[in-house]
Image (spheres, grey):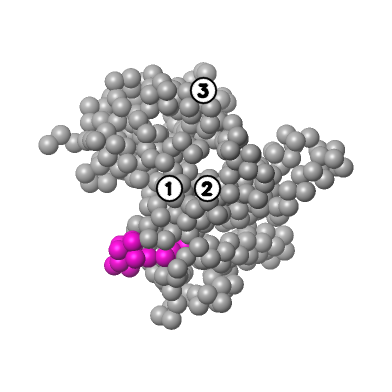
Amino acid sequence: MTKQTILVINCGSSSLKFALIDVATKEESLSGLAQRLGSEQASITIKYKGDKQTMALTAPYLHQAALAKLIEFLKTNSLTDSIVAIGHRVVHGGEEYHLPTLITEKVMAQLKKLSNLAPLHNPANIIGIEAALAAFEHLPQVAVFDTAFHQSIPNKAFLYAVPQKLYKEHSIRKYGFHGTSHYFVSREAANMLGKDINELSLVTVHLGNGCSLAAIEAGQSVDTSMGFTPLAGVTMGTRSGDIDPGVIFHLTSHCGYTVEQVDAMLNKESGLLGLSGISNDCRTLEEQALEENNPQAKLALDVFSFTIAKSLAAMTVSLSKLDGIVFTGGIGENSDYVRDQVIKQLSVLGLSLNEALNAQAIRGKSLNIATEQSPAILVVPTNEEWVIANQTHQLIQE
């Protein structure tokens, strides 16, 4: 049987992440990242057969140049013949897209209309799709949406208490993000617990530079912390998370800020970075707080952990019971300190963790770090690329 692989592309405004995945074995034979696209420092790093190679990109230093370098590498190593489709991560699918979707001219036109719902994300995703369509015109290409998994959320959880014409005419509602991650780790959690996903009530906690939580009942998302945009919810790396909307009016009416300045501040200058004045990187802040006794770093981590704990408790309102918590994402998978700080504030839910097991749950280890008396507290490495590859393959087989 001929090997079948899916090329997964996750395109950001100045980056392009990719992976080549064998759908039969789940093996990731190649992966990499192009970064600083649009600048003279643009480069692409490709990991293949245990080796890592970094190459500079030439003018115009854009996504097309990165894809051209990737295709050249794939051809040189005889990898193109096994590729059967391209799977693209698309952040916002609005209410139109509940499922992975084969990309056509009509779909592309619709995605461009949806860009006003995610102006920081969807335009970059579209750039990646257009570059891939030009490079792989003979292959089917599929969009897998971050928002799709959360389309099962009931209206009592996704509607905002604003005049409903805003929802009906402008699609203003909670959408939620990180859907592929929440989907994947909830299924992995069921496997770890030896239970059917349809029997479980879980809260999944994705913590990275972007952070979100989801309440998952019988395998479906029933609430999530992010909202109309990925700015809502808990404190994040550079995003504020939830704030009083009146702050925005005050800044623009009385403090001389423009709307554009407030937008940039809340998305790029707030969160852990804004609170600490040091960094948006949790590892740096833990080092500063625990080893250097820096009070601002400690404060940032305190706020971060508190907002996560508070959101986690709120997620349980949508569940029939609480079988377990699942931590994932770069911070969720590796920071025993943050996990400890979050769980310590949730004793009211009967949660408690085993400190020795918590310390072991780093660098890709899947563990249940709960005490025997507690609901499960799982650490599960996410694999969004596998979800995109698998769903892409399933769609082209239909």
Residue 288 coordinates in the image, percent (x, y) = 65, 60
Q: Quadrant of the C terminus?
A: top left
Furthest toward the bottom, the residue is 373
At x 29% / y 67%, what residue is drawn? 194
Please give the name of the residue rendered at 77% of the width and 48% of the height, measured from the top-left corner.
247
Identify whether 2 is placed above or below 207: above
Q: Nearer the viewer, residue 243 or 124?
A: 243
The amino acid type of the residue labelled 2 equals Gly
Crowding at dot 1, Cα within 10 Å, few <14 / some 14-19 / many 20+, comes out as: many
Frontmost of labels 2 and 3 is 2
Q: Please name the amino acid that badge 3 sits on.
A: Tyr
Q: Which residue is mark 2?
A: 176
Cα–Cα span, label 2 and label 3: 32 Å
* Percent position of residue 349, x then y: 52, 75
Q: The residue under label 1 is which amino acid type?
A: Phe
What residue does disc 1 label?
A: 149
